[in-house]
């Protein structure tokens, strides 16, 4: 476990260009079509063709990453929650589909990305089923067995569930969820000594966790096979155009310079979770991004901020907001802002304002 100015320019192509643009669409695909239209307006991309990605992906990547943000909130909640059954699973289902509707609306000006929509629909449907069934169970059986606990606190099984939840989040920030080893966690669960108090709650937790890990292990194998059959392995890096070269930093060894044409620097940095970290580092060095994966328009960013926050970054658009349901007075604000303004958004970070993720196409 991707834009407003460029697409306006792209859709403004003249009727005289429509014939050859149609040919480009059929023969070379969406990315080349977009690049061709930019070229016709003198906005030539410096990004090598093999590193360019379609501009709508910064939007469509959010629902996929919500299924990292949601388990992360759940893992944090479990660390010291007296009542694990009260986590708002049903509300998280609503937030996922709210986000999908919002980003889909933002991509209507682009060619329909069937592969990405299929993937989002599959993970969205499976998450809806998972959260729905788990919510029904926790709100009934889970709450009843919670009431049988004595005042000694969480059971060993509940502590174990919290640890596995955090291990899972740490894993999916870098790798696909279906590669997580649920089988070994199931073995570890039953290696816990059963002797002690709160027997009813402990047996119930073992039943619930065993069922969850078994189902996820089986489903993960199915998804792994289907994914490798349908989709090519994605590139683990993203090409960026910078306004200048950053100083060498051993803490960021995956920064690679491809070329320095004139006043620009063409480089690659890691994709996915690490993209946010590398972007934060570049911003701290006073460096601005000019392109991300061949795109100069908008990039989507999510922030964790107090309620009522308004970004001071010029041209930043609020796509939607979501309350962090387990943390009072905190919300997720999802913005679309020009690539050139990304570093400025990082400069706004402080103890209460944090860039949660940059959705890097």
Image: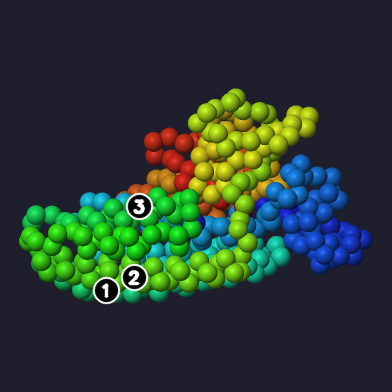
Choose top left, top right, bottom left or bottom right for residue 323: bottom left
The residue under the point 40% across, 50% down is 170
Can residue 174 be seen here? The reply is yes
Q: Label 2: which residue?
A: 214
Please state if 199 lies on the left or on the right of 311 as rendered: left
Please state if 153 lies on the left or on the right of 270 as rendered: left
Secondary structure state at the residue bearing disc 3 = helix
Q: Nearer the viewer, mark 2 or mark 3?
A: 2
- Determine whether 220 is above or below 341 in the image: below
Q: Earlier in the sequence, mark 1 or mark 2?
A: 1
Q: Label 1: which residue?
A: 137
Can residue 101 be seen here? The reply is no
Label 1 and label 3: CA atoms lie apart by: 23 Å
Q: Label 3: which residue?
A: 167
Residue 155 spot, x, y in % from top left: 16, 58
Residue 143 spot, x, y in % from top left: 19, 69
Residue 32's tag is: none
């Amino acid at each position: 476990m991707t834009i407003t100015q460029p697409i306006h320019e792209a859709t403004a192509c003249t009727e005289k260009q429509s014939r050859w643009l149609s040919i480009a669409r059929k023969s070379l695909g969406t990315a080349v079509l977009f690049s061709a239209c930019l070229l016709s307006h003198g906005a030539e991309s410096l990004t090598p063709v093999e590193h360019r990605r379609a501009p709508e992906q910064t939007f469509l990547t959010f629902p996929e990453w919500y299924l990292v943000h949601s388990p992360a909130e759940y893992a944090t909640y479990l660390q010291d929650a007296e009542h694990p059954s009260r986590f708002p699973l049903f509300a998280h289902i609503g937030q996922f589909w709210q986000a999908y509707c919002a980003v889909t609306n933002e991509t209507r000006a682009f060619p329909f990305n069937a592969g990405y929509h299929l993937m989002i629909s599959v993970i969205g449907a499976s998450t809806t089923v998972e959260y729905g069934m788990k919510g029904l169970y926790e709100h009934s059986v889970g709450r009843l067995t919670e009431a049988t606990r004595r005042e000694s606190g969480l059971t060993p099984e509940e502590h174990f569930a919290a640890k596995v939840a955090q291990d899972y989040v740490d894993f999916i920030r870098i790798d696909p969820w279906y590669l997580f080893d649920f089988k070994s966690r199931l073995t570890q669960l039953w290696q816990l000594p059963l002797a002690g108090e709160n027997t009813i709650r402990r047996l119930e937790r073992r039943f619930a966790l065993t069922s969850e890990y078994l189902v996820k292990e089986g489903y993960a194998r199915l998804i792994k096979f289907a994914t490798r059959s349908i989709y090519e392995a994605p590139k683990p890096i993203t090409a960026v155009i910078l306004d200048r070269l950053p100083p060498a930093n051993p803490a960021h060894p995956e920064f690679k310079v491809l070329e320095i044409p004139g006043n620009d620097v063409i480089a690659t940095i890691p994709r996915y979770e690490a993209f946010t970290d590398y972007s934060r580092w570049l911003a701290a060095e006073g460096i601005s991004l000019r392109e991300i994966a061949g795109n100069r328009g908008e990039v989507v960013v999510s922030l964790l901020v107090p309620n009522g926050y308004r970004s001071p970054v010029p041209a930043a658009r609020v796509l939607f907001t979501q309350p962090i349901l387990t943390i009072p007075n905190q919300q997720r604000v999802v913005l679309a802002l020009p690539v050139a303004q990304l570093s400025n958004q990082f400069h706004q970070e402080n103890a209460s304002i944090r860039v949660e993720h940059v959705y890097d196409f």
